[in-house]
Every structure is written in structure tokens, then in C-alpha cells.
Amino acid sequence: MPIRYLTADAVRQAERATGDLLTGGALMRRASSGVAQVVIGELRATGGCYGRRVGGVIGAGDNGGDALYALAVLAHRGVACTAVLLNPDRAHPGGLAAFCRAGGRIAETLPSGLDLVIDGVVGIGGRGPLRSAAADQFARLERAESGGPAIVAVDLPSGVDADTGEVHDPAVQATITVTFGAPRNAHLLAAPQCGRVEVIDIGIDRFGPSDGPAPRLSVLADDDVAGLWPVPGPDDDKYSQGVVGVIAGSARYPGAAILATGAAVSATSGMTRYVGTAADEVVSHYPEVVAARTLDDAGRVQAWVVGPGMGTDDDALAVLRTVLETDLPVLVDADGLTLVAAHPELVADRRAPTLLTPHAGEYARLAGDDVGADRLQAAAGLAAKWQVTVLLKGRITLVADPSGDVLGNDAGSSWAATAGAGDVLSGIAGALMASGLTPSLAGAAAARVHGHAADLAARSAPIGASALLGAVRPAVRAIREASAIG
Ligand SMILES: NC(=O)C1=CN([C@@H]2O[C@H](COP(=O)(O)OP(=O)(O)OC[C@H]3O[C@@H](n4cnc5c(N)ncnc54)[C@H](OP(=O)(O)O)[C@@H]3O)[C@@H](O)[C@H]2O)[C@@H](O)CC1
Ligand SMILES: Nc1ncnc2c1ncn2[C@@H]1O[C@H](COP(=O)(O)OP(=O)(O)O)[C@@H](O)[C@H]1O
Ligand SMILES: [K+]
């Protein structure tokens, strides 16, 4: 099942729906004991709890309350706990009383030599960057990678916007983020700032995929991707699984053609066609590709990928126009996007499934404005305006359809930030569209496999797009074998 990510409003709505649990404080007790359990797990993994030293930076709202109750639990376990109250008069009264009763110590500044620090400055009630009093406390700490204390953020790393994931400056860089009931948008959109995200069950209802106002963000689980991935069945032949056609590259830029076509060959069985002037180079790399120099000679396909390295001259425009005038699913990337930006009428009346896959620069050309800090709204806004599916590339890929549903994917690492990686993505996603997946599912599943392939290929050393392409099949295999479907 895809995992739904929530806005701060949706979280508050879900909490209010629990009625007595919220007003009676049960939710906060569950949340704080969840935070304490995660901290205990972390301390145990690094030498045990008793006698260890934990600090907390405590804001004026319920986020600070969660942190104080969690510190109280830790103090009862023999952990030496120190809290810095950013606003002593407004610290959560119940949490503060519990903390003091458990033997916690209040200080003006975090002491040195801490094993772990709890960020209880703000959660979903936070606005803007960390204020200076809080920022000063975190600035004193050595970074966790350089031997400093691990930082466990309660609900969100403070200074990160819950809904947009905007990382203000300054903001907390968390080692682990502990959240409650369901992840918040920021846990995907600002994933690198959150570290490992632990979701604690506190007994609130789950939101369904179509609940709440747009944009609604969800993430496919590996099992979803495994279940969606097309594989041949007993009655299949090379045509029945969906033939993808790739229009990419040129004699001058054959690389894009080879990468996009090779990715399509690797992603699904059946057949891949290629159309363009790099036909000889493509076939010399992939003899199984059925190549033609012109669209007229191409043969039938069930989806097109058009654009990578194809140029932006009149010939390219004519080919793009012909493809977009069909009623077949079409993925438009790279040079194809530059042409679409200059000729929006190419997609304006299109009814067939259409996937545009811009990086930030191409997005700005299409939208007439930069992506900005709210990438979710940027992707969803363009999809709604153009009535197409938009896959916005980056470490966090967002695939927005015109209805306001957005599928996101965190690549998990940034090894894919290499020239030609986008060509690989378009080949994978186009092959999935040819097999019948919607542009959203094709884009999101392709992004998941692409990120995984980059990790597998890199294993700590830099890669180029060819290595990424070589790891597409191992990535599909790993995801399918790890799931019940494999
Ligand atoms: N509802 C529930 O039952 C449950 C809620 N839960 C927990 O409650 C949290 C939400 O609590 P909340 O609504 O009290 O808001 P919260 O995130 O603490 O922030 C508000 C305070 O922050 C301050 N502040 C704002 N911006 C700031 C900044 N940049 N830098 C510094 N300070 C800033 C602002 O101060 P002011 O602007 O008034 O000076 C205000 O006092 C949620 O994230 C979860 O942890 C769990 O226990 C589960 C059950
Ligand atoms: N920092 C990053 N971390 C992970 N993946 C990234 C990062 N930056 C880009 N990517 C991914 O790499 C690919 C780059 O695509 P693109 O910018 O079109 O490159 P090219 O045009 O050179 O092929 C996309 O799939 C994108 O999502
Ligand atoms: K926090």
C-alpha cells in the first residue's frame, strides 16, 4: 500500500478525531514514550543506557512537552538528562513537572560531552527558521558525523516546514526523526534533513490516498513497485507486453539514444524500438532493438519516449508534433520539453496519457517561473494547469497528476546526480507506460528503481550513467526478490 504523507492541518484533524485521547493527554503520552523508546534503542546500540548523558532543547509548545516527557522516561532509566528551556515560563507544565520529578536537570546551555540531544524546539506548529536562542544551542554541538551527539528530532527537525519541506536557515540536522501516526510531507520533501524517520503508532486513523485537499502526497512502498513491475506471463509474446518506442539522440549526440533505449531494454521484456539518426550506434550496443531512421518506418508501439538529445530544430519539432498527435501514451523529456515550453499547444488538447519529466531548469522553462521552495506545489500546480502528469526530478522525485495526487520518491542517495541519468529514467518510465501503467505509477516506480540502481552501482564510489544503466536489472531483481511477489 502506498504510504500517505500528511500536512500539519491533516495531522491536527486526525488528532482531533481521536477526541478524548487528545484532550486526556493519551496521544502525548504515547508520542513521548515512542520518542523515549527510540532514544533507548540508540543508546543501547552504542553502549547502553545507564549513566549516559542526554540533553534536550525545549520550545514553548507541545513539541517541547513530548521531549520533556521523553526525557523523564530516560531519567527513570538512569540516563543523566539536561533540558534547556527556551521559554521557561511557557514550557509544557505537565512535561516539566514529570521531568523534574524524575531527577532531570535544567540548564542555561547544553553541557559538553552529551551522547545524544533531543530536538523538542518545534514540531508542526513551527514557522520559519530556528530562532537564535535555539540555533545557538545546536551551533555548540559537534556534528554527529564528526563524533558529536546524535540528534533525535521530535516530530520534525526544527526549522523545517512541515508542509513544504523547506529547510530554513538555520534548521536542525537530525540523525533520527521520530514522528507520530503518519509521516508528514517534510519527512519526504526534506528527507536528507530528517535522517532516519521512525513513525510511532499512537492510535490515530490513517488517511486514505484521496483524503484531504490537493496536493496529496504518497510514496510507493517497495512491495507496490514489485507488484506493479510488468513481467511476462505464460501467454505473452514480444508484442503483448507493450512495445516502447524511443526517439532520442542524434548522430552528434548518440549517448542519450543509447542510454534511454538501453534503459527501456533493461526495464521490461517484450520489444524496444528506436527511431532516429543514432540507429546504428543504438543497435551496435543493443542488437535486440528494432531501429528505424524515420517515424514512417518505425512500426507500432504502445508508448513513446521522445526528447533526450534529439535537438530542438524544425525536424525535431515535426517529429514531436506527430508523436503528440497520436492517442498513445507519450513521455516527453529534455529537448522535447524545451520544444513543448515554446509550443504549449503541442500538449494543450492532448487527452492521451502524457508524462513530462523536467529537471528544475526545464521546469522553469515550462512554468515560466522557478520551482521555488515549495516543490510539491510547483509540480502539482504545473500538472493541474497543463492537465498532464509532471515528474519533477531531483534527489526527491515528485510525480504529480492533474487530480492533485502526487507520488514521491527519495532516491536515498545522490549518486544519480550525473549526466545522462535522466535519459536512463525516461527509458525505464517509458517502458512501464508501454506496459500499461499510468504515467504517475510508471514515473514513481521508475524513480524508485532508478534511485536503487544508482545505489547498487555506486557502493560508495562515483558513477556515470552507464554504470547506473547497468544496475537497472539488479535493482528490479532486488526489489522483486525482497517482496512476497518476487
Ligand atoms: N496535538 C496533540 O495532541 C499531539 C501533538 N504532538 C506534538 O505537538 C506538536 C505540536 O505542538 P504545538 O501545536 O504546541 O506546536 P509546536 O510545534 O510545539 O510549536 C509551537 C511553539 O513553537 C514556537 N515557535 C514557532 N516557530 C518557532 C521557531 N521558528 N523557533 C522557535 N520557536 C518557534 C511557538 O512560539 P511563539 O511563536 O508563540 O513564540 C509555539 O510556542 C507536534 O509537532 C507533536 O510534537 C504529539 O504529542 C502528539 C499529540
Ligand atoms: N541530488 C540528486 N540525488 C539523487 N538523484 C538525483 C539528484 N539530482 C538528480 N537526480 C536524478 O538524476 C536524474 C538526472 O536527470 P537530468 O537532470 O535530466 O540529467 P540528464 O539530462 O543529464 O540525463 C533524474 O532522474 C534525477 O531525479
Ligand atoms: K522538533
Image (cartoon, grey):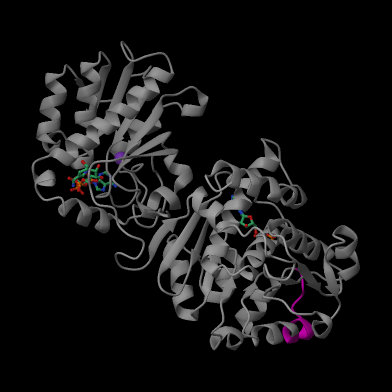
Please indicate, yes or no, whether residue 235 appears anywhere in the rendered image.
Answer: yes
Q: Residue 345, image x and y in percent?
A: 58, 88
How many discs appear? 0
Q: Residue at x 64, y 42 (%)?
A: 455
Q: Residue 303, image x and y in percent?
A: 66, 74
Give yes or no for residue 160 being in the magenta stretch. Answer: no
Q: Residue 255, image x and y in percent?
A: 81, 61
Residue 153 lies left or right of residue 392; in this view the side is left
Q: Can you tell me which quadrant of the image ligand 2 is in?
A: bottom right
Q: Residue at x 10, y 27 (%)?
A: 97
Residue range (magenta): 309-318
Q: Which residue is drawn at 39% across and 43% down?
A: 171
Q: Residue furthest front?
A: 234
Q: Residue 323, image x and y in percent?
A: 69, 83
Q: Nearer the viewer, residue 276 or 267?
A: 267
Q: Residue at x 47, y 60 (%)?
A: 407
Q: In this view, does 359 lie above or below 50?
A: below
- Would you identify the image quadrant in which residue 292 lies? bottom right
Residue 258 lies left or right of residue 391; in this view the side is right
Please indicate, yes or no, whether residue 168 appears anywhere in the rendered image.
Answer: no
Give yes or no for residue 310 being in the magenta stretch. Answer: yes
Q: In this view, does 301 lie above or below 46?
A: below
Residue 212 lies left or right of residue 16; in this view the side is right
Q: Nearer the viewer, residue 417 or 110?
A: 417
Q: Which of 290 and 386 is in front in this view?
A: 290
Residue 143 lies left or right of residue 332; in this view the side is left
- Would you identify the image quadrant in which residue 329 lies? bottom right
